[in-house]
Image (spheres, rainbow, N blue to C red):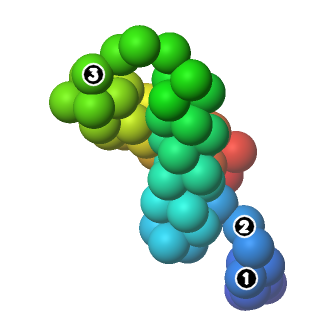
Amino acid sequence: MSDQHESRWSLGYTGNRIMWAVIAGALIACLCGGTDLPVQTQLVVLLVVGGVTYGVLTLLHRTRR
């Protein structure tokens, strides 16, 4: 087998998965900002969406190997 280097932008890098999780969480939090939700609830939404996004991206990366 030849050793192929992964692209710098691939999901193989933890930093890229974290970046996408933060972007998704921030997007959803911004959408919730227009509602009457308390700030604490918005922070929980940001963390949950970010965590779920990171988990899904990690699973996608592992199943593509």
Name the quadrant containing residue 48.
top left
| Residue type (three-letter) at the residue carrying disc 2 | Ser
**Residue in the picture at 50% in, 53% down:** 22
- Tag on residue 10? 2
Q: Earlier in the sequence, mark 3 or mark 2?
A: 2
| Residue type (three-letter) at the residue carrying disc 3 | Pro
Q: Earlier in the sequence, mark 1 or mark 3?
A: 1
Name the quadrant containing residue 36.
top left
- Tag on residue 26? none
Question: Is the Cβ of the residue at disc 2 closer than 8 Å to that at disc 1?
Answer: yes
Question: Is the Cβ of the residue at disc 1 closer than 8 Å to that at disc 3?
Answer: no
Residue pointed to by mark 3: 38
* Residue toward you, 16 or 43: 43
- Tag on residue 8? 1
Q: Whole-percent x and y of residue 6?
A: 73, 78
**Residue in the picture at 53% in, 45% down:** 26
**Residue in the picture at 75% in, 73% down:** 9
